[in-house]
Amino acid sequence: MKKRKRITLLAFALLSAGVIAACSSTNADESEKEETSQAAEPIMAVGSSAMQPLVEAAAQQYTKENPGSVISVQGGGSGTGLSKISEDAVDIGNSDIFAEEKEGVDAGSLVDHKVAVVGMGPVSHPETGVDDITTEELIGIFTGKIKNWKELGGIDQEIIVINRAKGSGTRATFEAFALQGKEPIDAQERDSSGTVRKIVSETPGAISYLAFSYFDETTTALQVNGVTPNRKNVESNEWEIWAYQHMYTNGEATGLAKELIDYILSDEIQETLLVEMDYLPVTGMKVERDAEGSIMKK
Amino acid sequence: MKGVQMMAKMMKEMEHPLYKKSGKIRTGRIGKWITFLSVALTAAITAAILFLVFSKGLATFITNDGSVKDFFTGTAWNPAEVNSFGKPIIGALPFLLGSLAVTGLSALISGPLAIGAAIFMSEIAPRGGKRIMQPVIELLVGIPSVVYGFIGLSAVVPFLRNMFPGSGFGIAAGTIVLSVMILPTVTSLALDAIQSVPRSLREASLALGSTRWQMICKVVLKTAKPGLMMAVIFGMARAFGEALAVQMVIGNASVIPHSLFEPASTVTSILTMGMGYTVMGQVENNALWSLALVLLIMSLIFTITVRVAGKGRVR
């Protein structure tokens, strides 16, 4: 009997100590918040893994300048970002496609914030002997009509097509603007740009597509119809394979979510951090594209 | 008055140590509850997983009107779109064949190797064999599957590309990586099976004048056969469920390949590739759950086979 009493007492003491500690820590938080005064509710941004590094870096820089604000950034893919934001389960849904393009997502209540632009382009193994192709040739390759680099004036080497996974934002953009909506053949599929680059650089005859930020000397970035894939050509829409990076909010953005989006859209971030990380500033675009893909001059 | 006295006396007797509940009994009872709760929790978690996978996996056929026949015999996989009958295109045959092919082939390669290694360790050079083999096997077990995949990507695939036509990605590469991965599992289980053959059988066989090799072939292996089968089936179960390493080297093309050196795919590789790109509750997502259901059913089948094969095992 005595022993049990002692245990109960101990448990009670522990519990109350815990409660007191918890209380005092929230007190501390509150006082801290009062000090910084503008600190807001913690927010969560979820979605596109292509955007994750950008949003993470921006959030980090923002929290450094505004201590006390808590922003957590997670990946999970554009599909996850769009579905979570339409369920209102997160504060910001990151996506590299328009919400209207994703089935099963109610785009009605979502507000689109285009924070950056990503240019993409076809890349091939460096030793194919080809560095400029036409749109028709590109479609021919990805639909399986052109099977050898020889047919394009390159070396005698079989073409190996590498796709991204179905549902990937990069793949959707590439199909829409490089293949003009044509469905590519069933070929190898990879789930990340990093793997695509590695495989294209190591497999003779391989061709795939990557965002500009993944371009390097291990692969050849192909010109399409004589246009070089670079920032200037994307901004004038001469290079048509590009996509917006969207940050969706459910209803108008409020609080910290709004502040973060405004921060990313500010000239300070657009011209420095964004460019450093190989995204293209959305402010520099000379054209505007809507969800249907039609282009308007700004 | 007398009654009160009696009561007092009884109370006093009750305080005697013999009437007291022993602390040990209480500990025993607590222990019983804790173990019971652990079992109940495990069972509940299993039931919850089964329920989730079944309900989600069957949704493709019930709510999305997918055809079961298409699922097992169709060769086109594009769950986002519907065919001319208005049903989602969910032909999973290429993945099912791919999974079965890599599983079967890797069992064919690693089975004999593992049994050979186990015979060496237990019958031919028990001491030296164990001193060398045991650490090697333990080392192989400890390597994460992503490392196997990466080695496959950087060594096996280029090797196959140089030796055979094609890009090197395909069932052959997947088989080689998986064979190495399941080798330690099969070896240690085969070793168990061979060592559980009673010593008296070996002695009797030698006493009857058989050579060591005859003893191994005709007595030890025959007696250990159910256990060896079990070991191989366990290895196959691991191979069937392995996702990461296979996904890296098999190429993930949803077609039925014409050779072992053409890109193919397995159920797990399609499942892990597609997960991040689908929206919960959509056909694409449900179709992936259906693949998960197939995996679950296959692992149940493997478990049952192991049980059945283990029935005849000599202990």
Image (spheres, helix red, strand yellow):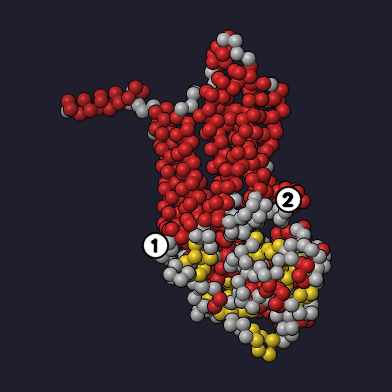
In front: A132, or A269? A132
The numbered mark at residue A129 is none
The answer to whether residue A246 is visible is no
Amino acid bearing label 1:
Ile
The quarter of the image holding the N terminus of chain A is top left
Q: Is residue B69 left or right of residue B204?
A: left
| Label 2 or label 1, whichever comes before in sequence order | 1
Would residue B10 be found to the left or right of residue A245 on screen?
Answer: left
* Residue at 53% in and 65% down: B78
Position of B39 with respect to B269 (left or right) is: left
Kindly identify the amino acid type of the residue bearing the numbered disc 2.
Phe
Tag of residue B62: 1
Relative to B203, residue A294 above or below? below
- For label 2, the residue is B164
Instruction: Locate residue B138, reporting x and y percent.
Output: 66, 34
Tag 1 secondary structure:
helix
Give x and y (percent) for residue B212: 63, 16
Name the residue: 30% across, 26% down: B14
Chain letter for mark 1 = B
For the point 80% across and 68% down, which residue is it? A154
Work out how far the residue at label 2 is from the one at label 1, CA to CA, in angstroms: 45 Å
Depth check, mark 2 against mark 1: the one in front is 2
10 Å crowding of disc 2: few (<14), some (14-19), many (20+): few
Residue B177 appears left or right of B24 = right
Q: Residue at x 46, y 35 (%)?
A: B307
Q: Is residue A97 above or below residue B40?
A: below
Please identify the quarter of the rendering in which residue B2 is found: top left
Q: Which chain carries label 2?
A: B
Q: Is residue B30 above or below residue B57?
A: above
User: Is residue A105 something one can see in this rendering?
Assistant: yes
Q: Is residue B75 above or below residue A297?
A: above
